Structures are given as structure tokens and as C-alpha cells.
Amino acid sequence: NAGVMQNPRHLVRRRGQEARLRCSPMKGHSHVYWYRQLPEEGLKFMVYLQKENIIDESGMPKERFSAEFPKEGPSILRIQQVVRGDSAAYFCASSPRTGKNTEAFFGQGTRLTVV
Amino acid sequence: TQLLEQSPQFLSIQEGENLTVYCNSSSVFSSLQWYRQEPGEGPVLLVTVVTGGEVKKLKRLTFQFGDARKDSSLHITAAQPGDTGLYLCAGQPQGGSEKLVFGKGTKLTVNP
């Protein structure tokens, strides 16, 4: 019973490089959410996707960040031209359905360090 | 913007003691979830409460959702060192939003 799988677990990038974070949802889950956790801060919503569709990206920075969830393969969170402030833990969650009282199950996260 | 305030932010107690963690908001949530997060890991779902006044028990943990669905509490009886961790509450805002709003968490340390 595989849970939400994220890779890599740790990622180090130099300023200006690109970071690609991958998330495979739990089997049978077609809804994916990305959250960011800064030190001493709570998790902040970034984006909600269903297969091939971005449903809500109200928490995504307007520039440099993008997300996709293709028909086949994992969801990808992409950060272009990373800056030190992008250093954080990025968590992916999945759920089997949408709507009220939906439970989300989280992966172990990708810890991005920008040097 | 919906906000969830958790208190206390830090809690250090001795094994065997009881404790309560609070999660408060001025906004109404259609459901509220409690998670526990260990260092370097993702949040693990403990419980979801959906009905105002609802009480759920998970072994030594008791979760309550306020009558007005604006607040929640987590009570741990006879805490053990294995209960150490970061406890997060997260609410699903009323109105159909899919995203969860998280509190900053309560960092619990149970000393043997």
C-alpha cells in the first residue's frame, strides 16, 4: 500500500538553476496538492491539480513557479531560476476525490536548499 | 483570509501528564484535520472532524470540533515519549475550497 511518493527527498541547487520536484499520488487518487513549509511556519497551500488540469493556483508565486499533472506520470512542481528564499520543504498531498471533507494524505516532502 | 491559531506553540511535559492543544479561528470550516509531523517527515493524518460538537477518540488522543466549527482541541491522556512531535491542525474552509489552511503547529516534547 504505497503512500504518496516524492522525489528527490533532498535537492540542492545553486542560485539561478532550475528545481524539479516530483510527486506520485497514492493509487487511485487523482487529486494532487502542493504545499510549502518554511522554517517555523505552517504549511502554505500552493496549487491544486487534477489530471491534466490546474484547478486552483492561488497560492503559487506569479513568476518562476509552475506545476503540472500529466495524464501519465507524476505531478511536477518546477521552480525556475531559484533564489535563496525558495529554500523550504515542499510537500505533495493526494486525495481520492474532491469536495467537502476531503482527506489529504501527504508525502515525505522534498527539502530544497538553494546555495 | 482564514487563519488558524494554535496554542501553545511549544509544550514540554513529563511522561504520564495530560495535555490539551488548541486550534482557534474566527472563520467557519467545513471540516478540520489533525496531523502529526516528525522532523524530516511529512504530516501524518490523525483524524478528521466534520460535525460541530463532534468528539473522536484515538487511543489516548481525544479530538473535539467546536459547536460553531471554528475551533478544535486535541487532548492527550497519560502522554508518552512516543507522542513527541509537531501537531498541526488544518481546516477546509467553508464554501467548497479544496485547499487546507494550516496552523503553525504545537511542538510537543514528552520527557521520560
Image (spheres, coloured by chain):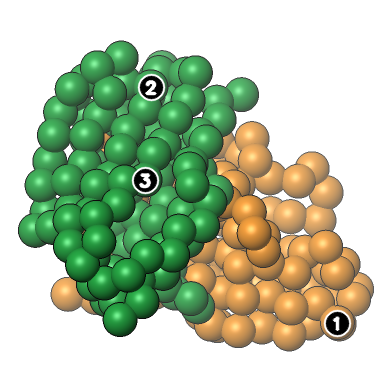
Chain colours: A orange, B green
Q: Distance from label 2 to label 1 (Cα)? A: 41 Å
The one nearer the camera, B14 or B35, is: B14
Label 1 crowding class (10 Å Cα cut-off): few <14, some 14-19, many 20+?
few
Label 3 chain ID: B
Q: What residue sits right under mark 2 in the picture?
A: B70
> Separation of disc 1 and disc 3 at Cα?
37 Å
- Image quadrant holding the C terminus of chain B, namely bottom left
Q: Is residue A98 visible?
A: no
Asked if residue A30 lies left or right of residue B103, the reply is left
Judge the density around disc 2: few (<14), some (14-19), many (≥20) Cα neighbours within 10 Å: many
The residue labelled by disc 3 is B21
Q: Mark 3, residues whose alpha carbon is within 10 Å: few (<14), some, or many (≥20)?
A: many
Disc on res. A115: 1
Q: Quadrant of the N terminus of chain B?
A: top right
Across and down, in percent, residue A114 comes to 81, 77
Seen at 47% across and 18% down, the residue is B27
Location of residue A61 in the rendering, given as x and y in whole percent from the top left corner: 76, 46
Q: Position of residue A60 (x, y in %)?
A: 68, 45
